[in-house]
Image (tube, rainbow, N blue to C red):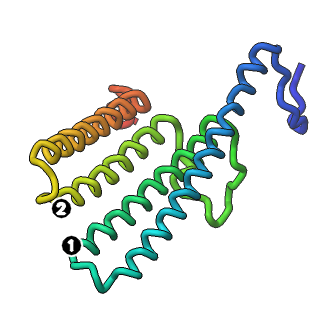
Amino acid sequence: MASNPLNTQPPTMRPIPRIIFASRWLQLPLYLGLIVAQGVYVYHFMIEVWHLLSHVTEYDENKIMLVVLGLIDVVMISNLLIMVIVGGYETFVSRLGIDNHPDEPEWLDHVNAGVLKVKLSMALIGISSIHLLKTFIDAEQRSTHTIMWQVVIHLAFLLSALAMAWVDKMVSHGPGHHAKQESH
């Protein structure tokens, strides 16, 4: 029996697969909670900007730089939240339906679980870099032990990101993918 191409009804599913497939909607409260967390970061950011503006004449260059790096840190964490909220919802819950929208993020076209993990690990490296830079600027306030562990943790983030990117490449392209493409 041929299927009707005009029929847009999804195929019927047996009860257990339907329940399992519908369980993805349990993630919705998690994404909504991250949106609330995003609001908390916006509030924190605005307080920090106000604090910077109200004390600008009292701060030296290093203090201003530390506050600005803190603001950049908040923005990077906020970007990480957006990647998780938008990318995770699109990948694991349901399509957003924003195709051809002028504000559609370019990266959303090719997002999948592997790409999302690599993007998130890169964002974490950026956040870790900001924290490390703040530590180096304010090094006299930190112990050598603390600085060493922050560098070790940052290197662990770097190695983890490289490993995830390599695994994603191997899984998505396979070891013989490059050779196959060259033969065509």
| 73 w.r.t. 123: above or below | below
> Is the residue marked by circle 1 packed among few (<14), some (14-19), or many (20+) residues within 10 Å?
few
User: Residue tagged by mark 1?
Assistant: 62
- Residue at the spot 33% in from the left edge and 82% down from the top edge: 56
Quarter that holds the C terminus: top left
Q: How many marks?
A: 2
| Outermost bottom residue | 57
Near-viewer residue (9 or 29): 29
| Coordinates of residue 113 in the picture (x, y in percent) | 51, 35
Q: Amino acid at mark 1?
A: Asn
Real-space Cα distance between discs 1 and 2? 8 Å
Q: Quadrant of residue 74?
A: bottom left
Q: Amino acid at mark 2?
A: Asp
C-beta proximity under 8 Å, tags 1 and 2: yes
Q: Position of residue 10 (x, y in %)?
A: 83, 30
Q: In percent of the image, x 61 and y 51: which residue is there?
A: 35
Give the left or right position of residue 142, taking residue 124 as reference: left
Please determine whether, in this image, residue 29 is positioned above or below residue 80.
above
Lower sequence index among marks 1 and 2: 1
Left or right of 158 on screen, residue 124 = right
Task: Give SS at disc 1.
Answer: helix
- Foreground of the two, 48 or 103: 48
What residue does disc 2 label? Answer: 138
Q: Nearer the viewer, residue 144 or 97?
A: 144
Please give the name of the residue rendered at 35% of the width and 80% of the height, measured from the top-left corner: 55
Image vertical order of residue 158 relative to residue 50, above or below? above
Q: Is residue 184 left or right of residue 136?
A: right
Which structural element holds mark 2?
Answer: loop
Q: Can residue 90 be seen from the camera position used here?
A: no
* Residue beneath the point at 42% across and 44% down: 120
Pick whichever, 118 or 63, lies toward us.
63
